[in-house]
Image (spheres, rainbow, N blue to C red):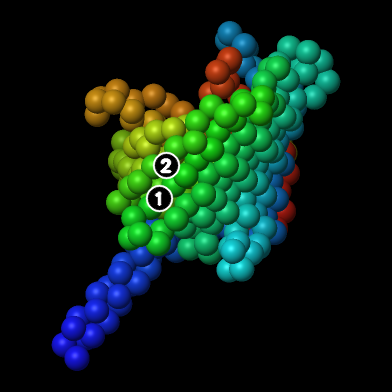
Amino acid sequence: MANKMIKLILVSFITLFPIQLKAQCEVENNSFRGGEYLEYDLYFKYGLIFTKAGISTMSVADARYKNKSAYRMTLTANSLGAAKAIFLISDTLTSYTTKGIVPLAYLKDAHEGGDYRTERATYDYSTGKVKLRNINKKNEDLRYDTTLVSNDCMYDMLSIVYYARTLNYGNMKKGDEVTVSFLSGRKKVNMTIVYQGVESVLANDKRKYNCIKLSLMINERAFEDKNEAMKVYITEDPNRIPIRIDSKLKVGSTRALLKSYKGQRN
């Protein structure tokens, strides 16, 4: 009887531990909901000049993942017209998360230049840790199939933007940071979200928005060795809409400026 009781306690502990980890990763989301759709004009930067070259969208849909309620977040970026001849880009990024913004899967299909790259990352919380398997291919050839393990929540290139929208910036001062684990190819690195204050941004709907300015920094080596992966400007209002997103490519960089929006939570 005593042995059965001990086994029961152990099984209960093992069963609950992953649930506790998921609960630690959950955040309160009051900024977006399924049905949100954002459209952007996309600019490429070659040298010192940004040139309008395409369109980008970000959307959130209510979905099912492994038969459970989830969000499906999708980002698309496509070069248009003459820009295709200079640098072709046709990217689709998809993240599945719980309604508490716990990452479940990340998919990337990217046509950039003459290459086609894919990523298929899936999250597993059953061991009491975050176990993330990422399969990466270039032109259909396997580049790597790696598994990362973390004791902390781990985000990808798309879910990190939505996670940043849920943070409480009300009591932050310029330079304050939030650091999380982040998927960077075959590596787990630190992503630091740096609060840079409030700035007015003119969007492509001809309106000015007071925006919270955030720098998303990847810390791969020493603590001081940080590279800015993305700069995001989100509205100061409860919707936290991304108005402008600057990100780096292997060749040059991109800027997305909000053109239209619908389906906001607030």
Q: Camera-side residue: 17 or 203?
A: 17
Name the quarter where the N terminus is drawn.
bottom left
- Residue beneath disc 2: 147
Do the residues under discs 2 and 1 have CB atoms within 8 angstroms?
A: yes
What residue is at 41 percent from the left and 59 percent from the top? 125
Task: Give how far across and how far down residue 162 sits, in percent.
Answer: 52, 49
Q: Disc number at residue 163? A: none
What residue is at 67 percent from the left and 21 percent from the top? 115
**Residue 171 visible somewhere in the drawing:** no
Real-space Cα separation, disc 2 to disc 1, in angstroms: 7 Å
* Residue 216 location, quadrant: top left
Q: Is residue 201 rendered to the left or right of residue 44? A: left
Does residue 233 sit above or below 114 in this rendering? below
* Residue 85 location, quadrant: top right
**Residue 19 visible somewhere in the drawing:** yes
Does residue 83 sit above or below 18 in this rendering? above
Task: Give how far across and how far down residue 111 sits, in percent.
Answer: 69, 26
Secondary structure of the residue carrying numbered label 2: strand
Q: Amino acid at mark 2?
A: Thr
Q: Camera-side residue: 261 or 78?
A: 78
Q: Earlier in the sequence, mark 2 or mark 1?
A: 1
Q: Disc number at residue 131? A: 1
Secondary structure of the residue carrying numbered label 1: strand
Residue extending farthest bottom: 1
Does residue 219 sit above or below 235 in this rendering? above
Task: Give how far across and how far down residue 264 sits, in percent.
Answer: 65, 58
Q: Residues within 10 Å of mark 2 (few under 14, many from 20)?
A: some
What residue is at 70 percent from the left and 17 percent from the top? 114
Residue extending farthest top: 47
